[in-house]
Image (cartoon, helix red, strand yellow):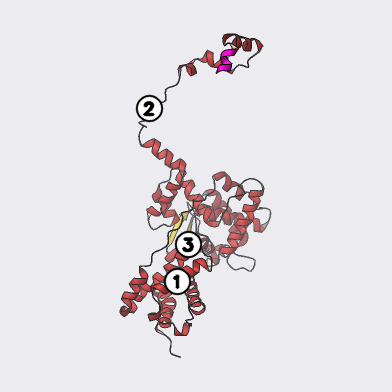
Amino acid sequence: MKPTDFAVQLSRYLGAYLLGQSGCSLNTVLSYRDTFTLFLRYCRDEQHLPPQKLTLERIDRHLIEAFLQWVETDRECSTATRNIRLAAIHAFYKYLQIEAPHMLNRCQDILSIPYKKARQKVMSYLTLDEIQALLLQPDVRSRSGRRNLTLLSLLYDTGAHVQELADLKIGDVRFSSPTVIRLTGKGRKFRLVPIMVRTEDLLHSYLEEYEPDYAVYAGYPLFRNRDGKKLTRAGIAYILEKYVSQAQSGGGIPVQTTVSPHVLRHSKAMHLLQSGVNLVYICDLLGHADVSTTEIYARSDAHFKRKALMEAYPSPSPEPEIPAWQKDSDLLSWLKETPNKSTCAGICSAFPLHLLIQV
């Protein structure tokens, strides 16, 4: 059977263009692949369009919008997930504009499908005391506990994405003054992040214990599971969840607080901001492409906003006038005293009972 034009273009896009030319990470390719797997399943089961008969001509804006609605209603996905699926479709049709110029009008029609506005969530982060309570949970008497303490300390101290931490290799650690970690983010872009002295000591002890000749094994994963393979995102999340539950049981973290690896990244950024670190440096540490992305932390911190407002200029509002009786210290001390019988008798004689009843 001759493949359809849609099958040819999608295969080239996922197999050759994304990995070979655009430089996308494997995770991005897998995410895009999952989107089109869902789309093909929708076309087959809901629209009765088998994959072998699906052509570019049959895919229009109406079909894409129906698919996105199915993702939200039938699969009960969030608005964010719906927008992720649409982003993958948009990326494919941007590619298709060049590869199939005769479909230009159709491509632009699909590219005009807007993203759905989602209710913005309140940014969640932990205080310094809560971070400390979390890092006190691993049992450092055990080998795995020492590894987990190093892992969580590095996850917080670098402000890394969980995938960036999972991808770390021993060669990405550079013991110098200061010690820096080489993180590889989206688009295979890397950045150097310095770590604090205590985290450096933990990391050095961890490598000495696990890999005494760690300089020889630069290509090995920094954090590995029992099988010697690198820890996955799910594995790191499981380790974090374990110690968060322990900290919540001990009262160090509120029970209702949800803590994910990304919350530690938010926490690091907020603590730097609250300490007076410039947004430009925080932007560079987090690997944001633009400082406007980092400004979300400044908008989320009520104490930071209040401090900025108070330092801007004096308030034009007049000071409240304090009543004269509040300035009389003798009167205030008299009013605070516990009334005795003689005091009550004096009050009653000063105010006739029949007047009190009328009032």
Classify 19 as above or below 126.
below
- In the rendered image, residue 182, in percent from the top left (x then y), is placed at 47, 60
Magenta-tinted stretch? 354-358
**What's the distance in space between the residues labelled 1 and 3, CA to CA?**
15 Å
Q: Determine crowd level at label 2: few under 14, some 14-19, many 20+ residues with C-alpha closer than 10 A.
A: few
**Which residue bears the numbered disc 2?**
318
- In the rendered image, residue 340, in percent from the top left (x then y), is placed at 65, 13
Dot 1: what SS? Answer: helix
Amino acid type of the residue tagged 1 in the rendering: Ala
Of all residues, the one furthest to the bottom in this rendering is 1
Mark 1 or 2, nearer chain start? 1
Q: Which mark is residue 66?
A: 1
- In the rendered image, residue 262, in percent from the top left (x then y), is placed at 52, 56
Amino acid type of the residue tagged 2 in the rendering: Pro
Dot 2: what SS? Answer: loop
Q: Determine crowd level at label 1: few under 14, some 14-19, many 20+ residues with C-alpha closer than 10 A.
A: some
Foreground of the two, 352 or 264? 352
